[in-house]
Amino acid sequence: MSTFIATARHAAEARRWHIIDADGQVLGRVATRVARLLQGKHKASYTPSIDTGDHVVVVNAARVKLTGRKEDQKIYRQHSGYEGGLREERARRVRERKPHKLIEDAVHGMLPKTTLGAAMYRKLKVYAGPDHPHAAQKPTKFEVA
C-alpha cells in the first residue's frame, strides 16, 4: 500500500474556482474560509509543501460586517520604513477608501509568510461590488455559514 502525495502538476489540474458573497457576513468568518480554500486544506490531497489550493473570488466586500465597535476601534497601520513614517487608519475610513483591503488584509494575515504563501495569496480576487470579470472560469458558489 502506497501513500499518495500530490505533485505540483496534479495540484494545478485539480484547481477549481469558488465565489463567496461577503454581504452581511462577519469579516473573520469569511477570511478563515477563504484562507482554507486558498491553502487547499479542504481537499484530501492537501500537502503543506505544495500549493494545492483553489482560486477564490470574493464579491460585495464593501458590505462585510465588523462585530462590536471594531468599525471605530480597529486600526490599520503601515510604515514607510522612514523615521516618523507610520500611518494609521481606522476601519471605517479603510472601508470608505478601499473596501477590498479589509478582506485582503485579514486573509493575508492567515496565510504562511513564505513564497508559497505569496503564491496562495495571488489566487485571491476581491471586489467591492457584486460584479466580477471571472464568469468565464465558472466559479462555484461557496456558502459561509
Image (tube, rainbow, N blue to C red):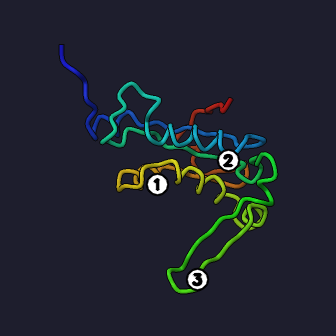
- Determine whether the residue tagged by mark 3 lies in a helix, strand or loop: loop
Q: Position of residue 97 (x, y in %)?
A: 73, 68
State the residue at coordinates (59%, 85%): 84
Amino acid beneath label 1: Arg
Q: Quadrant of the N terminus?
A: top left
Q: Contact (CB < 8 A) between labels 3 and 1?
A: no
Q: Position of residue 74 (x, y in %)?
A: 72, 59
Query: What mark, if any, has residue 85 been given in the picture?
Result: 3
In the picture of the structure, the residue carrying the numbered disc 1 is 122
* Camera-nearest residue between 17 and 7: 7
State the residue at coordinates (36%, 51%): 116
Task: Establish if 33 lies above or below 107.
Answer: above
Sequence-wise, which precedes: disc 3 or disc 1?
3
Q: CA distance from mark 3 to mark 1?
A: 27 Å
In the picture of the structure, the residue carrying the numbered disc 2 is 59
Q: Position of residue 73 (x, y in %)?
A: 77, 60
Amino acid beneath label 2: Val
State the residue at coordinates (74%, 61%): 91
Task: Establish if 143 lies above or below 32.
Answer: above
| Rendering quarter of residue 14 | top left
How many C-alpha atoms fall within 10 Å of the one at disc 2: few (<14), some, or many (≥20)?
Answer: many
Sequence-wise, which precedes: disc 1 or disc 2?
2
| Rendering quarter of residue 53 | top left
- Determine whether the residue tagged by mark 1 lies in a helix, strand or loop: loop
- Determine whether the residue tagged by mark 2 lies in a helix, strand or loop: strand
